[in-house]
Image (tube, rainbow, N blue to C red):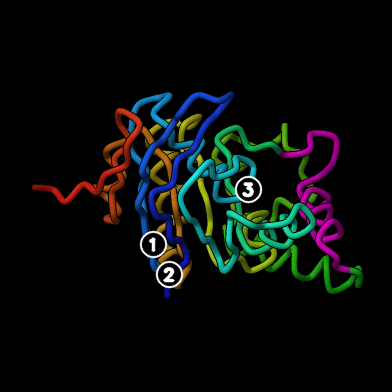
Amino acid sequence: MDILNYKDVELRRHEQIVLDRVNVTVQSGEMVYLLGRVGSGKSTFLKSLYAEVPLHSGKGTFVGYDLNSIRQRDIPMLRRRIGIVFQDFQLLSDRTVEENLLFVLRATGWKDKQVMRSHVQDTLGQVGMGDKAYKMPYQLSGGEQQRIVIARALLNSPEVILADEPTGNLDFETGKEIMELLYGIRQAGMTIIMSTHNRSWPELFPGRQLMFAGGRVSENTGE
């Protein structure tokens, strides 16, 4: 099943063309790397998937939504079907790990406090952070914070995880641990679309490679 289908899509930022004639299809369960220099359009591409950047032309569908005609009121529903992992964590610094995750559940319509707390604990356990619920973000290492961000992305059982340079602020060994976690999640059936500068990751954790250069997106076939 296609989770993403772009046909001749053009993306612009501030009226400048960033990507032109993008033709990309992603199947459910794939691991897809977005590779390219800073400014090559990887983040713009990811933002178009969750409707922060509109499609200027062409046709695009993602997790069952037509991105050409999506209504403003439907964008929150689209975003509930995806999990987003940011490079800079974006955790709320004034509350505990548990409260960070409970905040997301409340914002997405969960009501039962006991069920919510149990779900948060289960999800933290999935990422190896089951004993960190009471900690504040500043008490955690960068790798631990990124594990919490991945837990946050998993809370609503998304169809796909979008990861924007998830290891960009981490040393190699810590980054490798995060990649092992993400790859394990992918092997359990999750679709992952991830931008990265690190060419080691596709070698260590194989997946499709989409190359971003000169305003175009092409498949790296390894030839």
Distance from disc 1 to disc 3, alpha carbons, whole Å, reads 17 Å
Q: Is residue 215 above or below residue 64?
A: above
Going from N to C along the chain, the mark reached first, 2 or 3, is 2
Q: Is residue 181 left or right of residue 206?
A: right
**Mark 1 sits on what residue?**
26
Q: Amino acid type of disc 3? A: Ala
In the drawing, what numbered circle is on residue 4? none
**Mark 3 sits on what residue?**
51
Crowd around label 2: few <14 · some 14–19 · many ≥20 (10 Å): few
Label 2 with label 1: CB-CB less than 8 Å: yes
Crowd around label 3: few <14 · some 14–19 · many ≥20 (10 Å): many
Crowd around label 1: few <14 · some 14–19 · many ≥20 (10 Å): some
Q: Is residue 166 left or right of residue 223?
A: right
Distance from disc 2 to disc 3, alpha carbons, whole Å, reads 18 Å
Q: Secondary structure at mark 2?
A: strand
> Which is more toward the observer, 122 or 152?
152
Label 2 with label 3: CB-CB less than 8 Å: no
Q: Amino acid type of disc 2? A: Asp
Residue 98 among those drawn in magenta: yes
**Mark 2 sits on what residue?**
2
* Residue drawn at 51 percent across, 44 percent down: 46
Residue lying at the far front of the rendered structure: 57
Going from N to C along the chain, the mark reached first, 1 or 3, is 1
Q: Secondary structure at mark 1?
A: strand
From the top left corner, tell me how far across and down residue 116 is, in percent. Answer: 83, 68
On the rendered image, what quadrant is the N terminus found in?
bottom left
Q: Write down the region rendered in magenta.
A: 91-110
Q: Amino acid type of disc 1? A: Val
From the top left corner, tell me how far across and down residue 69 is, in percent. Answer: 64, 57
Going from N to C along the chain, the mark reached first, 2 or 1, is 2
Q: Secondary structure at mark 3?
A: loop
